[in-house]
């Protein structure tokens, strides 16, 4: 009895502070945002209310649908590009690099760009792709084109390239982990059975890394879908993503109830994707078990 | 000893391999090497570009390169506003890391050692800010501060970063605690040490590398943070916010210069955190 009471006391002493902190600065803000998403708006104030007007507006106004589908589309392309960049690199690291030390070095080298300022990495693409930028001046310098190509910057192509560049390490990490876990004996067995390199790859290696690929897709997709910095920097006029709209609602538009409703939608989409991919990953693991 | 099957397999495979061999290398390996090199180049070219152009005299970042100069560095370090922003960022990052540690270590300990109602919910809640887009944490905290009448300032930015980044300390310290052999703590208690003393002399040294490593990561992330800062800052700017406002107006190689400095510092911080964390990992392994 005294033992358990002492344990309870220890727990209270340890966790009372953090519990208050988490409740105040994390749980309360999310709860308040959820509450405000039901408020109504009478410029310039918001009226405490409980109505679904904001959500109905989200569904009925085609503009929001457009922005949402654009965000999902761009995020999808970003993930696909990141995948095609990551897989050969990781495959090379895991299967072709013989020395573990070199492999670790390469892996760290792939992750390092993550820690180099996000903003600066987005910004360099602006300097590379711009009309007066490095790519254009290079093309002119070596004489391939006569005048700068406007097509590089301020469009969705630039957004996909920039975000794929920024988020590729998030794809590399889970795929690397998945590839490294594959037992070498399986590949040897496949080879002994006379299956060629490509057959082995498509029938053994690739299916075994699906959980890793899925995790990578989840990371990059959610990150890209929630980004509002890169679209503003390199996106140009038709590049508003859902996060940009949220930022506008909290800024110039000053419509917080609408912004909150949009944020809640974003929150549920992201949580939904994470839960789904978690479930699929588990199913995949069981099948391969 | 070779069976008929094996012979047949060999005959079938070998001609193809002969065909694929090319000067000691087979074609698929060569292709893969080239592809990997290209991807690595893609990952590093922009960073290298930024660095190279910070030393280039031309105010427009374009090729061909003109003469080399330190002018942009002098200009950046003579820029009052930029230096104030840099100072603010350092203050914010240090305070945020302090919060992360004060909240994160007890939370990790509680998650590791106690069973309490809502434990799973807490574990999910804590990692929400690094799972969700940063913007959602930013706007929800902005709403919270506005509703409670708190003025936006560097203090609100610090609280925001502290909340968003504590997850990193919690997950790292928690992972280390799970690997930690509790018997040495019991031994310490059996020898009559009070709980606090046991924590200080036994637990803390064992999770030290996880603490240092995750603090360095949290510091780097806070120093670079935009989505939360964007909504929570008052009149004071942090460095990323200053850079953000500058590059939206136009480009100046000054940003390349300050960027090169930031990249240098963050790579040093990151490498030391990797070194610290993996170093202790190597020492731990034999015990397992």
Image: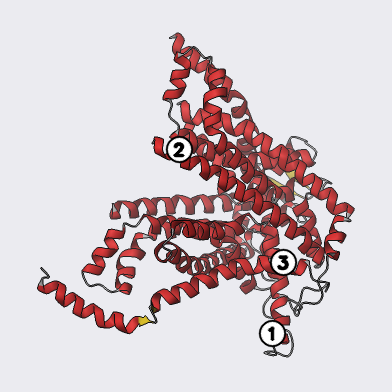
Q: Quadrant of residue A205?
A: bottom left
**Up/down of A277 relative to B217, above or below:** below
SS assignment at label 3: helix
Can residue B117 be seen from the camera position used here?
Answer: no
* Gap in angstroms between the C-alphas marked 2 and 3: 40 Å
**Up/down of A28 relative to B252, above or below:** above
SS assignment at label 1: helix
Name which residue lies at 34% across and 57% down.
Answer: A182
The residue that disc 2 covers is: B284
Tag 3: Cα neighbours inside 10 Å, few (<14), some, or many (≥20)? many
**Residue with the most extreme top position:** A2
- Looking at the image, residue B145 sits to the left or right of residue B18; the answer is right
The residue that disc 3 covers is: B50
Same chain for mark 1 and mark 3? The answer is no
Mark 2 or mark 3: which comes first in sequence? 3
In contact (CB < 8 Å): disc 1 and disc 3:
no
- Indicate which disc residue A139 carries: 1
Q: Which of the image's four quarters has the N terminus of chain B?
A: bottom left
Name which residue lies at 25% across and 69% down.
Answer: A191
- Indicate which disc residue B151 carries: none
């Amino acid at each position: 009895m005294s033992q358990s009471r002492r344990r309870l006391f220890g727990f209270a002493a340890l966790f009372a502070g953090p519990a208050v902190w988490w409740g105040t600065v994390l749980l309360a803000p999310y709860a308040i945002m959820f509450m405000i998403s039901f408020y109504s708006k009478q410029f310039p104030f918001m009226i405490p209310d409980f109505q679904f007007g904001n959500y109905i507006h989200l569904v009925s106004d085609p503009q929001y649908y457009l922005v949402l589908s654009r965000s999902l589309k761009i995020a999808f392309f970003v993930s696909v590009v990141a995948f095609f960049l990551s897989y050969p690199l990781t495959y090379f690291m895991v299967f072709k690099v013989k020395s573990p030390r070199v492999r670790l070095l390469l892996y760290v080298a792939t992750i390092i760009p993550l820690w180099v300022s996000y903003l600066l990495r987005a910004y360099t693409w602006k300097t590379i792709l711009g009309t007066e930028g490095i790519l254009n001046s290079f093309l002119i310098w070596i004489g391939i084109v006569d005048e700068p190509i406007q097509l590089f910057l301020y469009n969705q192509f630039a957004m996909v390239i920039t975000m794929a560049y920024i988020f590729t390490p998030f794809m590399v990490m889970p795929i690397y982990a998945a590839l490294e876990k594959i037992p070498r004996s399986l590949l040897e067995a496949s080879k002994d059975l006379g299956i060629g390199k490509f057959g082995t790859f498509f029938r053994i290696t690739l299916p075994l890394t699906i959980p890793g690929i899925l995790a990578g897709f989840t990371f990059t997709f959610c990150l890209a879908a929630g980004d509002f910095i890169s679209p503003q920097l390199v996106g140009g006029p038709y590049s508003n993503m859902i996060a940009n709209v949220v930022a506008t609602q909290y800024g110039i538009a000053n419509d917080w109830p609408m912004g909150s409703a949009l944020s809640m939608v974003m929150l549920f989409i992201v949580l939904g994707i994470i839960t789904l991919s978690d479930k699929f990953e588990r199913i995949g693991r069981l099948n391969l078990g | 000893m070779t069976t008929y099957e094996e012979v047949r397999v060999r005959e079938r495979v070998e001609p193809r391999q002969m065909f694929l061999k090319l000067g000691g290398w087979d074609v698929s390996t060569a292709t893969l090497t080239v592809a990997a090199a290209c991807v690595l180049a893609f990952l590093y070219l922009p960073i290298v570009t930024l660095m190279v152009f910070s030393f280039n005299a031309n105010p427009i970042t374009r090729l061909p390169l003109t003469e080399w100069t330190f002018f942009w560095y002098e200009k950046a370090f003579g820029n009052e506003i930029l230096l104030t922003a840099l100072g603010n960022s350092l203050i914010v990052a240090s305070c945020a890391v302090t919060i992360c540690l004060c909240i994160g270590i007890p939370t990790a300990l509680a998650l590791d050692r106690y069973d309490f109602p809502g434990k799973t919910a807490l574990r999910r809640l804590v990692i929400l800010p690094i799972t969700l887009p940063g913007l959602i944490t930013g706007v929800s905290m902005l709403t919270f501060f506005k509703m409670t009448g708190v003025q936006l300032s560097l203090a609100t930015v610090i609280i925001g970063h502290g909340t968003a980044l504590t997850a990193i300390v919690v997950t790292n310290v928690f992972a280390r605690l799970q690997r930690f052999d509790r018997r040495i703590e019991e031994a310490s208690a059996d020898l009559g040490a009070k709980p606090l003393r046991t924590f200080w002399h036994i637990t803390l040294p064992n999770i030290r590398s996880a603490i240092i490593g995750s603090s360095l990561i949290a510091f780097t992330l806070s120093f670079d943070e935009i989505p939360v800062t964007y909504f929570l800052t008052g009149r004071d700017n942090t460095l990323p916010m200053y850079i953000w406002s500058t590059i939206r107006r136009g480009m100046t190689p000054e940003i390349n210069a300050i960027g090169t400095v930031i990249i240098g510092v963050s790579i040093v911080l990151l490498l030391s955190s990797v070194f610290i964390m993996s170093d202790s990992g190597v020492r731990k392994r034999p015990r397992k």
